[in-house]
Amino acid sequence: MSANALIDALAQALRADPRNGPLWLHYAELLRAEKRDAEALTALRTAAEITAVRDEALLKLIPMLRNAGQLSEALIRAESLLERSDSLQLRTELEAIHAAREGRAADSPAAAPTPTPQPSRTPEPGAARNLLSNAPARADDADWAAQFDWGDLRITLADVAGLEDVKRQIRLRILAPFQKPEIYTAFGRSGGGGLLLYGPPGCGKTFIARATAGELGARFVSVSIHDMLDKYFGESEKLIHGLFEHARRKKPTVLFFDEFDALASPRGSSEQQFWKTLVDQLLQEMDGVQSRNKDVLLLAATNVPWNVDPAFRRPGRFDRVLFVTPPDDAARKLMLTKAMESLPGGSRIDVGPLVKRTQMYSGADLRALCERAAEPALDRSLEDGDVHEVTAADFQRALTQVRSSVLEWMASARNHARYSNEGGQYDELAEYLKLVQRW
Amino acid sequence: MAEPTSQRAFAERSEDPAENALRLASRYNDVQRCELAEREALRGLAAAPENADLQFELARSLFGRQQWRRADKAAERLLALAPEWPAALNLMCLLRAQQGSYGEAERLILDALRIAPESAALYETYGDLMRKTGHEAKAVRLYERARAIDPTDVDVHAKLALVESSRRRAGVAEKHARSGLACDPEESLAHAALGTAMLQRGRPYAARRHLREALRLEPGNESYEEAWLEADRYCRLVYLPMYYWCLLLSRIPGKQFMVWGIVMVLVALAGSLGVPPGVTGTFMLAYIAFCLYTWLASLILRLWLRLRPPNLDIEEA
Amino acid sequence: MKARTRVAKPRRQRSEDSGSDDLLRPSLETEFDVRSFRPLIDPNSILWACFFGGPLAGGLLFGANYRSMRMPRAAALAWAGGFAVMLLAIAIFFPILADGGADATSRSTRSGSRMIVSIVSVALGSLVARHQLRPFKAFVNADRRPRPLFWHALGACVIAWIVVIAIAAAATRLFGAHG
């Protein structure tokens, strides 16, 4: 049997048994031997998702990424592996990656001082800036790396507390086409496209977007209205085009638009020509996503999906819409436990009653609750110099002071789900509202 | 080598944080993300505390968030910075009218109109004020002036229709609402105005359709929801006679009291006119039965609505 | 509701002839401010009280509304007017109402006169209601909640009936004593 025939046979076997880790590793080896590096990388990325062979797959994937020049991903994956299992081979590999990155930075005339991979959680507001650069590929990658939010790819869906249904939908509808392209190709489909996340504020839409990118191991570029307006007023078309062109060149890439409604409100309501032009350009680029931009995933988050121009909902654009619910009981329990662990005496407080009393609280509300509950203990500690513990009574008191910020959103969402649910666009929301009717 | 796009962009970019904040705040206000607009305006004001435009966006955002007291302070500060800016006077007028300080609101809008006598928006605000305070004839004239200045403003057409409806001139109201819809068929206020006019013209089914459409276009509007539910009630067979009866009463001076008076006079005259007592008795019984129906109609409807709740389906509605 | 607050610059473009434009003449009192109002009763609803309770009940409620609008003189006038109309009605219809005849004609005459009093009360009440309608609209449009009618109307009617009965009784005793 020829190597190609063997590869085809293995591909078929993997379609039947996609969770077979050793088979993915073998498949990747064969692809690599046939110099089909891009496919081998995809296969290794998939294998790295399977717990049984994850470390083995990563040990093969990281040098391949380094050799392919995908240093950022290599670095992040190496660091995450190092956290789990320290080995000399891995340390050597990490040094090699650092050396390669430094070499690039020195080569590039446009490069800023070598970026230190800080696990910052704050998105770089000027992230889009470097994407317009027409500099050669190597320098471009360094630019890209310089503006990259290093913390992102470490976040995966496993870090998202609760929201199991949302995660399942993302795995099925977003991740699978990237991770199992063969299956999707067999159905005449490809990865990419758009997903609009909506829900009450503070419920983790942005976090989920980042986790999706982390899960894919894809580049993540966060674009906000600040990027469009702060620096590029009057250059919107070029900026948007540059952004998408970059994403097309550097796929797989996740382009994430936060507060999407502010960027893409209905054109009729935009008073300035600037915004109309921007929305038109965005629509034009999105139309190209399916045909030209395989493996470019567009994610957007908004609190007010009804303020997004309906043109963005058409097929091929943000045709997939996901409602991000407020955290369920399990998620709240996890969030509260985590938050309380960091407070003195917090781990001794029974979370159960708090979980019951915080229905319809967002993640942000829960954080505020913990902060408010800690205040009296902090005051007591400051008064006498000893560290006082937070008590259940502090939490009970805080509960009367911190109210759910989700309810207000639900009140306005209810009418949209009831009166403006054309084509079932808010079906998920309507279902959820039925479940939480008493609120 | 061609100049990189990014560098061209940088060449034209604004480094002034106040200017950037102003653009953002203005945008956020335009798309009704007032909490974000407030944040940006405050950010800008930290850099340029005397910037009237930023102060305007701040007041506008607070107005949008219905934080009246803070909006009032911001608008006062804005007027201190730009006492003769019509937009500032207009905003302050809106605030005062919202609070119920109508006399001051009128003074402010008149000041603004003296400065910018050709502003359709100012005439519209003044028309709103007059409508709110029951000066409907003047409101019509003000809206007509606004329409003459800017014939494409759908809101003015719709408001003309609404004010004519409240003056019980349903035919004229319908004409205005239809001309508004001709300007923009997707304008919720124009649909609501047409629905209101239809209710007055005795066409509850058409009214329900238009009010449902208004609600589809602006689901968050409570007054549309209320009006639609009301139109839906009128469309129920158990309540339809009551609707037409109310419509008739609204056109009779003295309303039900007049009807009662007429019935009493008729009954009193019946004896002297030689009407057989049987006829008078039957008439009285029928009248009393009808009165009973009018008193119980709401209760019957409420029971009926429990069995057949309003249909949310746009097509069927 | 979306507030239309944008007005194009330039900031100064003062019109010379705007003073001659009657549209730009103020229609409201400078101090017209519903913030100072106490909750009002819908003036159109007060007509029910006029019908069932007569002019005094209507006068009481209209007067209370004027007081809530901070118009004490108008309130006093409404109360005095209601009382005066009631006295007039008693003066006119007292002989009929005092007639204790039990035949059909007497009964229908009595009910007819009661009806006339009610209709006159409603007619006069409509005039006052018209006067109160604008401030009431302004009050409601400032997102203020009107006062519910039922208990106030019932109270006013009960007071009016007691007063009428007391006056009628006094009159009967007085005129009865003098033959």
Image (cartoon, rainbow, N blue to C red):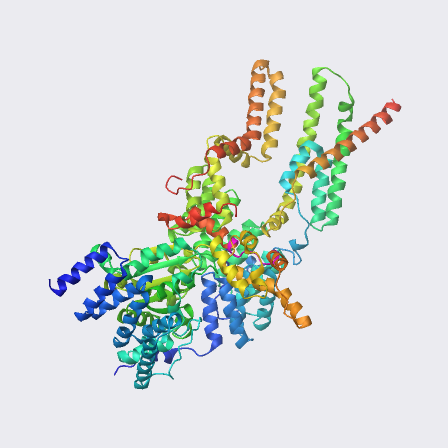
Residue B163 drawn at (x, y percent): 51, 48
Q: Quadrant of the N terminus of chain A?
A: bottom left
Please state which of residues A22 and B243 is positioned toward the viewer in this rendering: A22
Residue A5 drawn at (x, y percent): 13, 61
Dividing the picture into quadrants, the one containing residue C174 is: top right
Name the residue at the left extreme.
A1
Dividing the picture into quadrants, the one containing residue A104 is: bottom left
Q: Is residue C65 left or right of residue B39?
A: right
Q: Is residue C16 visible?
A: no
Which residues are the magenta region?
A400-407
Q: How many marks?
A: 0
Q: Is residue B180 above or below residue C108?
A: below
Residue A356 drawn at (x, y percent): 54, 51
Q: Is residue A370 left or right of residue C177?
A: left
* Residue depicted at x 26% and y 73%: A64
* Residue depicted at x 58% and y 58%: A349
Q: Is residue A365 above or below residue C150?
A: below
Please state which of residues A270 and C160 is positioned toward the viewer in this rendering: A270
